[in-house]
Amino acid sequence: MNQNIRLPFTTGEAIKTHFTGLFLTAGVAIAGLVLAQNSIAQHWGFSALTIAIALGIVLGNTLYPRIAVGCASGVGIAKQQLLRIGIVLYGLRITFQQIEGVGIDAILTDCLVLSSTFMLAYWVGTRLLKLDRDTALLIGAGSSICGAAAVMATEPVVRAQASKVSIAVATVVVFGTAGMFLYPVLYHLGVSLFPIFQNQNSYGIYAGSTIHEVAQVFAAGQAIGSKAADTAVIVKMIRVMMLAPFLLLLSGWLRLRSDEGSAQSRKLTIPWFAVLFIVMAGVNSLHLLPATLTRELIVLDNFLLAMAMAALGLTTHMGAIRSTGIKPLILGGFLFVYLILGGGFINWLVAFFF
């Protein structure tokens, strides 16, 4: 027997693959950040995260397979560890004072919209459309909380395949972008008909509690006025704040439904990055960090999340996306309609009683 069997990678080669993959995802992330500053991208509400995953998918299905062996480990680090760090730093965008400022009615509205949308996504996705559980959960998380960022944050808990994550991201981006343009039109059409459109504050709560992405919420609010935009973003950030307890509850629910053996099913996996997300929000609320440092960390956070999106795109194969068919889009479309109609009813109901 040959005793000189060579390992696939020496320590030096492993380090090289780490750095090569990280440099690749960093390059795609930088391209996404630069292109997001373009006036066309800003007009259509395409964030750096959206552009980064799109560029990653293009490279992942053309050039990347030829060099994947030499940089796969670094791409994996970006998709997993850097993603978790990015979610933690995302908490620096939120303060508890903002939550207090919008009142209990906005918080209750967010809770009801989030929970009803997610439960509906799971039931319709798995029971009616016969989608796999992971795809339904990811689309539900993205639609009910904060779009692509919520999909990426849910992935470590669900442990879904890269293709399913990409499908969910693409779905929430499509319908979130549609909402960004549709909501101002609905406001002008219904300003004299529906209570939720009678002033900028009520419209802001409605937009913030039902539109997918933060950038899309801001654009939809700004189209009506600065008051609408400010209220919409604060209400939206409350939804973002709910990401952490959502992930903790989802982790516990998945544990209870686990069929992988009694020993493993009794073990609760806590997504610590979600807990640290709340800690960072607390740090920001107490102003424990200088404002300049906070702004720099948010810039770093945008970069890390863009790297994670780029890594996700690089590992997504179009064949896997095509194999899922049109059902994910049907689910996303159904949830989009529910957020407009059902979310509007919830907004009216809470405003009526509070």
Image (cartoon, rainbow, N blue to C red):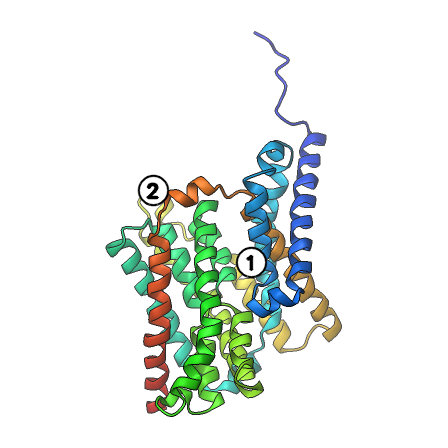
- Numbered badge on residue 50: 1
Asked whether 305 or 41 is in front, the reply is 41
Furthest residue toward top: 1
The amino acid marked with disc number 2 is Glu
Q: Residue at x 51, y 74 (%)?
A: 217
Dividing the image into 4 quarters, which one contains the C terminus?
bottom left
* Residue 145: % across, % down: 45, 67
Q: Is residue 128 above or below residue 45?
A: above
C-alpha gap between disc 2 and disc 1: 35 Å
Inspect this view and state whether residue 247 appears: no
- Of 238 and 192, nearer the camera is 192
> Which of the marked residues, 2 or 1, is nearer the chain's N terminus?
1
Image quadrant assignment for residue 345: bottom left
Spot occupied by residue 307 in the image (x, y as percentages of width and height): 62, 52
| In the depicted structure, whether residue 221 falls above or below residue 84 | below
Front of the two marks 2 and 1:
1
Check disc 2 and report the residue beneath it: 260
Q: Secondary structure at mark 1?
A: helix
Q: Are marks 2 and 1 in contact (CB under 8 Å)?
A: no
Identified at 42% across, 76% down, the residue is: 110
Q: Is residue 337 left or right of residue 94?
A: left
Q: Residues within 10 Å of mark 1 (few under 14, many from 20)?
A: many
Residue type at mark 1? Thr
Residue 219 in percent (x, y) is at 55, 75
Q: Which residue is rendered at x = 57% and y = 35% of the image? A: 65
Q: Is residue 277 visible?
A: yes
| Left-right relation of 285 to 154 | right
Q: Residues within 10 Å of mark 2 (few under 14, many from 20)?
A: few
Judged from this view, the residue extending furthest toward the left is 128
